[in-house]
Image (cartoon, rainbow, N blue to C red):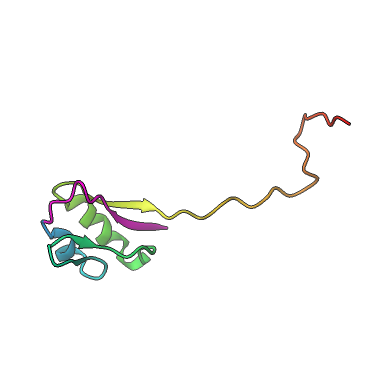
Amino acid sequence: MKRLRVDPIACDAHGLCAELLPELVELDEWGYPVVPGGPVPTHLLAHARRAVSACPTLALLLVDVERGPAPPPQGNGKVPGQVQCG
C-alpha cells in the first residue's frame, strides 16, 4: 500500500497537487498541501502517481505504508546450524 507525503522544505505551494488530486490533497490558508496519513485508495493510485510526477519541486512523494514489525518466528526458536550451549 502507498500513502502520500509532502516534503515541507521542498514545497513552494504551487498547488498543482491539489488541482490534480483534490480527493486527497487540500491546501492550507497559505497554499501548502495537507494530505491524509492513511493509505491511498486503489482507485486513486494512478491519479496520485500523476500528481507526484507533476510536482514542480518534487515535494509530493508516494511512499510505502509501513506494515508494522515482523511477527515472531515460528518453531522451536533454533537457528539452523546454531549450537546450543548449556
Residue at the right extreme of this rendering: 86
Residue 50 on image: x %, y %: 22, 56
Q: Main secondary structure of the magenta part?
A: loop
Looking at the picture, how far across and down is residue 9, in whole percent? 21, 47
Front one among 45 and 34: 34
State which quarter of the image contains the C terminus.
top right
The x, y position of residue 54, in whole percent, is 17, 52
Q: Nearer the viewer, residue 43 or 73?
A: 73
Is residue 11 covered in magenta?
yes
Residue sitting at 78 percent across and 48 percent down?
A: 75
Which region shows up in magenta?
1-13
Q: Residue at x 17, y 64 (%)?
A: 18
Magenta run includes residue 35: no
- As rendered, which of 46 and 12 lies closer to the eye? 12
At a point 39% along the width and 63% down the height, the residue shown is 39
Horizontal side, residue 5 vs residue 26: left or right: right
Res. 31 image quadrant: bottom left
Q: Is residue 39 left or right of residue 53?
A: right
Q: Position of residue 21 (x, y in %)?
A: 21, 65
Quarter of the view holding residue 20: bottom left
